Image (spheres, rainbow, N blue to C red):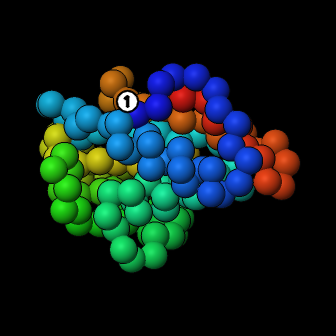
Amino acid sequence: MQKEGTYTLRSPEETAAFAHDFIAGLEAEQKNATTICLYGDLGSGKTTFVKAAAKALGIQEIVTSPTFVIEKIYDLDTKNFERLFHIDAYRLKEGSELLALGWNEIIANPQHIIFIEWPKYVADVLPTKRHNLTFTFVDEHTRRLNVT
């Protein structure tokens, strides 16, 4: 995984390369799902990052934002993870809505990797141990990414 810090990504290709390196260095959590929270305004690069991360994990199908369905699930064939969850919490008002989707079972499985866009809407149910990535739109081609 890329170490904590701030990165400047000057193209979708640089975002994809960063996502690939992030996934390559990521180790599965031992007791719970590995959770990656993606913060940032519309158009800041969150979904672009998830698409590239999914590709790095071997997903061949087209990955799109689950804005209207809230959650998309992809089966994986990797040594660390067996299922990827892509959640868009933009339309949720609180964590209890995520609980209704089976959140407790999802988060309890260390073979799951979860990407959550708009995590601020469900912050009350997020694990304290997680990866936070904050995307900032700089200009048409450039994004700033802060990893904590």
Above or below 58: residue 20: above
**Secondary structure category for the residue under label 1:** loop
| Amino acid at pointer 1 | Arg
- Quadrant in the picture for the N terminus: top left
Q: Which residue is mark 1?
A: 130
Q: Quadrant of residue 43?
A: bottom right
Q: Quadrant of residue 128?
A: top left
Q: Residue at horizontal 20%, vertical 56%?
A: 78
The image position of residue 73, as x and y in percent, is 31, 65
Side (left or right) of 81 relative to 123: left
Q: Residue at horizontal 70%, vertical 49%?
A: 44
Q: Is residue 36 visible?
A: yes
Side (left or right) of 94 relative to 42: left
Above or below 20: residue 76: below
Q: Residue furthest right?
A: 139
The image position of residue 65, as x and y in percent, is 52, 65
For disc 1, the neighbor class at 10 Å (few under 14, some 14 to 19, many from 20) is some
Q: Residue at horizontal 65%, vertical 32%?
A: 7
Side (left or right) of 82 relative to 56: left
The image position of residue 138, as x and y in percent, is 81, 42
Q: Quadrant of residue 23?
A: top left
Q: How many numbered circles are shown?
A: 1
Above or below 140: residue 4: above
Side (left or right) of 86 relative to 82: right
Q: Is residue 105 visible?
A: no
Q: Residue at horizontal 33%, vertical 24%?
A: 129
Nearer to the camera, 147 or 9: 9
